[in-house]
């Protein structure tokens, strides 16, 4: 069995297509960033739709209880 030669950091980070392919991927990522026009609050509100109402209610109650306990301990 032949020993594999170690790869340089550049070889590890660059896609298989070489440097030209890396530049294409960077351009695609920059284009994708321009399309995001939602605010953080809109993004968080959208995440709430992923979970059922019972999970959201339980998470809210847990947060409220944790906040109450932390405030009581601080006093």
Image (tube, rainbow, N blue to C red):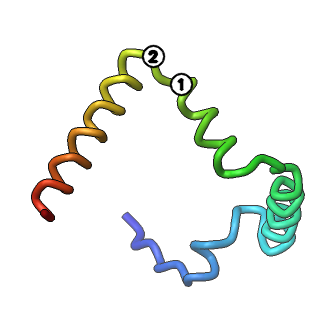
Whether residue 13 is situated above or below residue 24 in the rendered picture: below
Which residue is nearer to you in this view: 51 or 35? 51
Estimate the x, y position of residue 47 in percent, counting from the top left: 57, 34
Q: Is residue 7 left or right of residue 53?
A: right
Q: Secondary structure at mark 2?
A: loop
Task: Using the image, tell me which numbered label, if any, was put on residue 50.
Answer: 1
Q: Secondary structure at mark 1?
A: loop
Give x and y (percent) for residue 59. 33, 32
- Residue 46 in percent (x, y) is at 63, 33
**Please, is residue 40 above or below residue 21 in the view?**
above
75 vs 56, left or right, is: left
Q: Is residue 57 above or below residue 1?
A: above
Q: Which image quadrant for residue 24? A: bottom right
Relative depth, front residue between 59 and 10: 59
Q: Residue at x 41, y 25 (%)?
A: 56
The answer to which quarter of the image holds residue 49 is: top right
Q: Which mark is residue 52?
A: 2
In this picture, is 45 found above or below 32? above
Residue 4 placement: quadrant: bottom left
Q: Is residue 57 left or right of residue 46?
A: left
């Amino acid at each position: 069995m032949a020993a594999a030669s170690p790869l340089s950091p550049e070889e590890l980070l660059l896609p298989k297509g070489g440097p030209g392919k890396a530049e294409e991927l960077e351009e695609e990522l920059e284009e994708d960033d321009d399309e995001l026009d939602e605010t953080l609050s809109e993004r968080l509100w959208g995440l709430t739709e992923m979970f059922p109402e019972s999970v959201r209610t339980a998470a809210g109650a847990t947060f409220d209880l944790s906040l109450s306990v932390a405030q009581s301990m601080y006093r």
